[in-house]
Amino acid sequence: MTTDQFSRNRDNFCYRHPDRQSFVLCQRCLRTVCPECQTPAAVGVVCPECLRNQQKAQSPAQRTAERRWSRARPIAVRDTRPIVTYAIMGLTGFVFLLQLIPGFGTTVTQSLYFWAPALYPGLTGIFEPWRIFTVMLVHDPDGIWHVALNMLALWMIGRSLEPLLGRWRFLTLYLLSGLGGSVAVALLGFGIPVVGASGAVYGLFGALLIIGRHIGANITGIVVILGINLVITFLPLFTGGVARVSWQAHVGGLLVGLLVAFIFTRTRAASQKSLQIWLLVALGAVLVGLFLIPPLLYF
């Protein structure tokens, strides 16, 4: 589907605000709703019209019982804040503070950073698979710039991208991108200890690039920022210096982010929800399966 075709399809825009693109559907009528029109329900969100109809359908006994037991109605809470983004930032910041504790911080870092040989007990005698994800929580404890820049990028992208995709899609994008970074390190930098959420953040950059292109947005600024970051990542390799950042994680996260966003844009219809889920599961399975390759290359 071209950008022009995508822009002309009214199903891709909020039915109450035709100028606002969204990827979120009302769980009752399956119409597209923008963040302003979304009301969180028990599962998914509902639009204002469905919310009113649902409230009108309540019997007097139901309303009385609800008041008597003081139960808050989930569907009546309107919250379009990027909760997942804030949660990731908070958890990452908490882990960074733990890393600063003398003595204990070293243990935290050593327990959570990514080190590919720890996935192969036949080589090292240990098996610590959690490192493929926990690497996104730990950063260089010798300086605040590493974690600060990653969290700033997460905040800038997440507050726009999370309401557009929805919380679960955004979290899936972040985790799969981080996993892609770990896979790339295992394949291209086996034995190199790695810390940081850069792979996941680069995945968000890639997703923003794809989704921005499909909704007809001006993505020039995104391309420039991404290009500058990639140059900074690879510059030490071309100048003979020592790279202090993992270009493998950056590239791996970026490629997976592009692919996840492509899946999101190609499985937009409500009838394709199951297909979208299975494609994401298949992508995760393929990424995990790629960890079988390093033993063939390095053992």
Image (cartoon, helix red, strand yellow):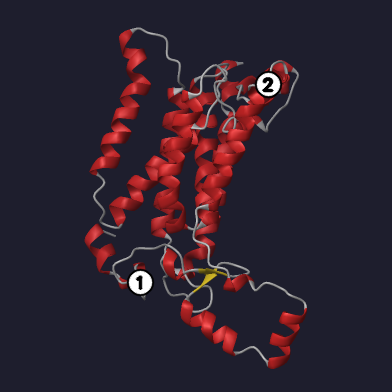
Residue for badge 2: 101
Secondary element at tag 2? loop
Residue for badge 1: 11
Please tell me which residue is depicted at 75% across the width and 84% down the height of the picture: 65
- Tell me if residue 195 comes above or below residue 220 in the rendering: above
Residue 163 placement, left or right of 101: left
Please tell me which residue is depicted at 68% across the width and 18% down the height of the picture: 106
Q: In front here: 32 or 94?
A: 94
Q: Nearer the viewer, mark 1 or mark 2?
A: 2
Callout 1 amino acid: Asp
Q: In front here: 170 or 120?
A: 170
- Tell me if residue 26 comes above or below residue 150 in the rendering: below
**Quadrant of residue 214 within the rendered picture:** bottom left
Percent across and percent down for residue 12 are 35, 67
**Quadrant of residue 138 within the rendered picture:** top right
Percent across and percent down for residue 201 are 45, 37
Q: How many marks?
A: 2
Quadrant location of the C terminus in the rendered image: top right
Percent across and percent down for residue 274 are 54, 63
Query: On residue 87, which mark appears?
Result: none
Q: What is the residue that sits farthest to the bottom in this orientation?
A: 60
Whether residue 219 can be seen here: yes
Whether residue 256 can be seen here: no
Secondary element at tag 1? helix
Callout 2 amino acid: Ile
**Quadrant of residue 202 within the rendered picture:** top left
* Separation of residues labelled 1 and 2 (CA atoms): 52 Å
- How busy is the neighbourhood of tag 1: few (under 14 within 10 Å), some, or many (20 plus)? many
Q: In front here: 91 or 201?
A: 91
